[in-house]
Amino acid sequence: MKTHPLFVLGRLWLAACMLWLPALCLAQFPRFKVLAFYNKQVEPAHVDFAEDAIRFFKDLTIGNGFVFDTTSNMADLNDAKLAGYQLVMMLNDVPHGGEQRAAFQRYMENGGGWYGFHVAAYNDRNTDWPWFVDFLGGGVFHRNNWPPMPAKLVVDTHDHPVTRGLPDSFVAPINEWYQWKPSPRERSDVRVLLSLARENYPFGLKDIIPGGDTPVVWTNTNYRMIYLNMGHGHAIFGDATQNKLFIDALRWVIASDKKGNVFGDAE
């Protein structure tokens, strides 16, 4: 399957907007299209998050800056539908069954973008999808804290467009945090951007993360993707620093190539 022409045209148009034709682009909308998948029948806290996320990202479309479409029909994860979007966002679900998984893999391998929250990366010994585990950097769900709690996060590197404007650390709102084994950090093609600070440990009251390495935001440099572990409950969009992270991550995935190079980036 060849890269769909819409991907190519969309990326060239974005490059032109950022480099050469800003005045023209201000009058030409939309700039890109996002399709966000969510499930209404999952854990209530994940539904709450998805509803808040939809409001948050729709607010960013003010002025018709981009298209943010949503669907709760996972059957929309097919070649024909995905061809019309530069970015797929998974709010609280994952592809189901062989056809959806194959369509998602083709989409990503041919230049598509992925922005995944929280449970969108969940996988365990029963998932039986080796490509997806590799896509996420090799990590399999190991354990989590419970109940959901705020956490101190540390920025692993400021040498990345997603984290340049962030402080060295900040306290993120209440969330259920996942730890992965092995840590995605062990993979050379994964770039970890934020992690749980070690000052959090032991972390939890009922279910405890006693220690270890816990990346919470990372990208697999073989793809145009980012994963963010936030996504449980109503508190996620209540912090300005974390909201900036979400916005900068969206801009980066849209504007970058597979290796994370951003069109028009001065560095």
Image: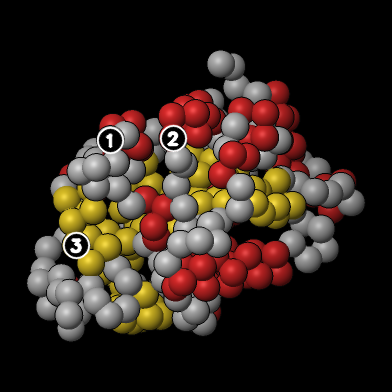
Question: What amino acid is found at the position of numbered circle 3 in the picture?
Answer: Arg
User: Foreground residue, 20 or 248?
Assistant: 248
Quadrant location of residue 145?
Answer: bottom left
Q: Is residue 31 above or below residue 215?
A: above
Give the mark, 1 or 3, whose residue is nearer the N terminus: 1
What mark, if any, has residue 97 been given in the picture?
Answer: 2
Label 1 neighbourhood size at 10 Å, few (<14), some (14-19), many (20+)? Answer: few
Disc 2 residue type (three-letter): Gly
Kind of residue at badge 1: Asp
Residues under labels 2 and 1: Cα distance?
A: 11 Å
Query: Can residue 39 be seen from the camera position used here?
Result: yes
Tell whether 137 sits left or right of 208. right
**Regarding mark 2 in the picture, which secondary structure is present there?**
helix
Name the residue carrying label 3: 143
- Viewer can see residue 266: no
Vertical placement of residue 176 versus 2, above or below: below
- Label located before the other in sequence (3 or 2): 2
Residue 38 horizontal/vertical position (percent): 55, 56
Extreme residue in the front direction:
41
Return the mark for residue 128.
1
Looking at the rendered image, the disc whose residue lies closer to the viewer, 3 or 2, is: 2
Residue at image coords 24%, 42%? 126
Q: Badges 1 and 3: C-beta atoms under 8 Å apart?
A: no
Which quarter of the figure is the N terminus placed in? top right
**Residue 161: image x %, image y %?**
48, 55
Q: 188 or 100: which is nearer to us?
A: 100
